[in-house]
Amino acid sequence: MEENERKTCIVCGESKEEGITVVTEFICTSCETEMVNTNADDEKYPFFVKQLKQLTVRFHA
C-alpha cells in the first residue's frame, strides 16, 4: 500500500493506513489480527461473519 494511503476498514469502519485488501474491500491490521484469533464460539464471531459477507466475488459466465 502506498505511504499515507488511508482506506476504510469494512470491519471497524475506521480509516487506517495498514491492512489488507480482500477482493475489493479493506480490512485493517488490528481487525485482521482480532479475527484470526477469535474462536467460532466467541460472542464476536457472528459480527465478523456479518462484516465479511460484504466481500462479494462476481463471476462472469
Image (cartoon, rainbow, N blue to C red):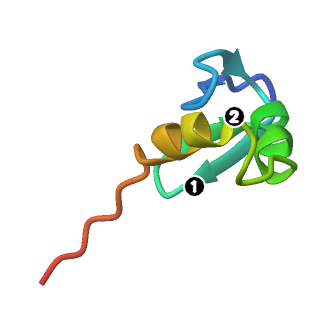
Q: Is residue 27 above or below residue 13?
A: below
**Badge number at residue 35:** none
Residue 1 seen anywhere in this rendered image of the structure: no
Tell me the quarter of the picture where residue 61 sits: bottom left
Identify the secondary structure beneath mark 1: strand
Read off the residue under disc 2. Answer: 43
Residue at point 79%, 52% (across, down): 39
Q: Earlier in the sequence, mark 2 or mark 1?
A: 1
Identify the secondary structure beneath mark 2: loop
Q: Residue reaching furthest left?
A: 61
How far from the left and from the top, in percent, is residue 53? 42, 48
Report the side of 52 relative to 35 (left or right): left
Report the side of 27 relative to 51 (left or right): right
Residue at point 57%, 34% (across, down): 47
Report the side of 60 relative to 11 (left or right): left
Residue 23 seen anywhere in this rendered image of the structure: yes
Q: Residues within 10 Å of mark 2 (few under 14, many from 20)?
A: few
Q: Quadrant of the N terminus?
A: top right
Q: Nearer the viewer, residue 41 or 9?
A: 41
The amino acid at mark 1 is Val
Read off the residue under disc 1. Answer: 22
Residue at point 24%, 74% (across, down): 59
Residue at point 67%, 22% (across, down): 6
Tally of marks: 2
C-alpha span from label 2 to label 1: 24 Å
